[in-house]
Image (spheres, helix red, strand yellow):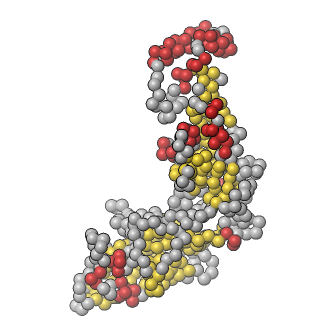
Amino acid sequence: MPITTFMTRFYHSSIISGRSFNYLKTFSLAIIAGILVLFSSCEEEGTIIGRKLLPGSDFISMYSTDTLSIRSYTMYSDSLESDNPEYSYLGQIYDPYFGTTITEFVSQLRLYDTLGSGVYTVDSVKLMLTFEEVSGDTSAGHIIRLSEISDEIFKDSTYFSSQPVPLTGYSVEAVLPVLRSDTVNTITLDLPPSFGEYLIRDKTKLFYSENDDEPDFRSYFKGLYFQLISAGNSTFIKLSLLPPDNFSTYKHVLTVYMHDADTVNSSINLILDAKTKNAAFNKYSHDYSTAEAGKKIVHINDGIKDTLSYVQCLNGVYTKFVLPGLEDIKNDTSFSGIYINKARIICPVQYDGDAYIGASFPSLLYMGYYTNTGKTYLVPDYSISTSFYDGKIDTTAGNYTFNVASYVQNFLDDSKGTLKPEFQLALPEGSVQNAILKANSSNFPVKFELTYTRF
């Protein structure tokens, strides 16, 4: 329908804030519009009169389409950055569609105390850990293994979820007690006194240096590789490595208790969730071959458009969207002067009535966009307004909706070819749920809705 220009300036305020505006013309048009409302006997007659009074350049047209197709692909890369995590994980997750995922992590220990130069006898070593979530087999008997790493790690270095972890060969183990599912578990494990003796064997290194060139505790004891070993059914544990606030205590502390030659007791603490953060990274491995027959993901990284696509937690498979029709609009010179009113991607989910029902899906998905270098970034719509962006599961409608008007406008205005009409779905850090989406030639595939104003 024809709409006078001044009526739409608030539709695009975040996009055309730099445009000049003729206030006198706007005021005149407002008076004309008021006269038409007062004297028109019907809507059609008012429209005709308006056309006679206003030049054609003062009319714009609004269009809407949902016919632009989206191609969906399931992708996977085992070389994703996993350093400086907020959460780390231990154990295994099994999913009938996604198979088996094994989780481990590596971290430095932050020396909290100092120790004198005397002779000390280690009495005991305690490891306190706080598990944010526990699922799977919670019975006693799972073994936690702590192995010394041989290469120093650094907070400003990049580490990947698939990279090998060189070890010195020194390790200790402890048996987990009975755990409680779906609640916080704080446990204290007994480690052998010999581990404490090993940690304090060179007391000249029990310090931190402000000079990076001076060897200190971080180069003396480089860190631990945490693994969980289960003889029977697997368990899965989630830990937070975020430092505590000013009113909270540390959640993960290794304490060495000892006494000196005069039987004076003392101790030193080594912190995992230190306020001066440790260098750390997560390790993940995914075995899709263990999924149930008939439910296995068939097409990964092969460019084949399946009827389903997948989004997995813990750096697993993800969904990539390609919108060739959006590229066509950008390259069509007859579409110049377009402003995006609404652009959203609607992704129907696949319920199976068993493992995947409404509550089984993650509450939120993030949508990223691709650049011509292959990198991905969160769409700007999320930063503008998280409520407008949406991305939340609608369990009644059975879909996720993503509003991406700002990104689509940026893409159409991008004259350097930096942005691509391609998107990626990912999970927030800490999410341990997966999503299965309908795609391509399914009965209800992913849909792209676009409403734009053409000047």
Residue 177 seen anywhere in this rendered image of the structure: no
- Compared to residue 39, the image places residue 170 above or below, namely below
- Compared to residue 322, the image places residue 217 above or below, namely below
At x 67%, y 69%, the residue is: 288
Q: Position of residue 204 (x, y in %)?
A: 27, 83
On the rendered structure, is 380 left or right of 252?
right
User: Seen from this angle, which residue lies furthest top?
Assistant: 39
Q: Which one is nearer the viewer's eye here, 217 or 144?
A: 217
At x 46%, y 63%, the residue is: 86
Q: Position of residue 247 (x, y in %)?
A: 34, 61
Which quadrant, please, contains the C terminus? top right
Which quadrant, please, contains the N terminus? top right
How many marks do you count on the picture? Answer: 0
At x 30%, y 71%, the residue is: 212
Q: Which one is nearer the viewer's eye here, 278 or 247?
A: 278
- Compared to residue 390, the image places residue 9 above or below, namely above
Q: Position of residue 166 (x, y in %)?
A: 48, 79
Q: Position of residue 226 (x, y in %)?
A: 48, 76
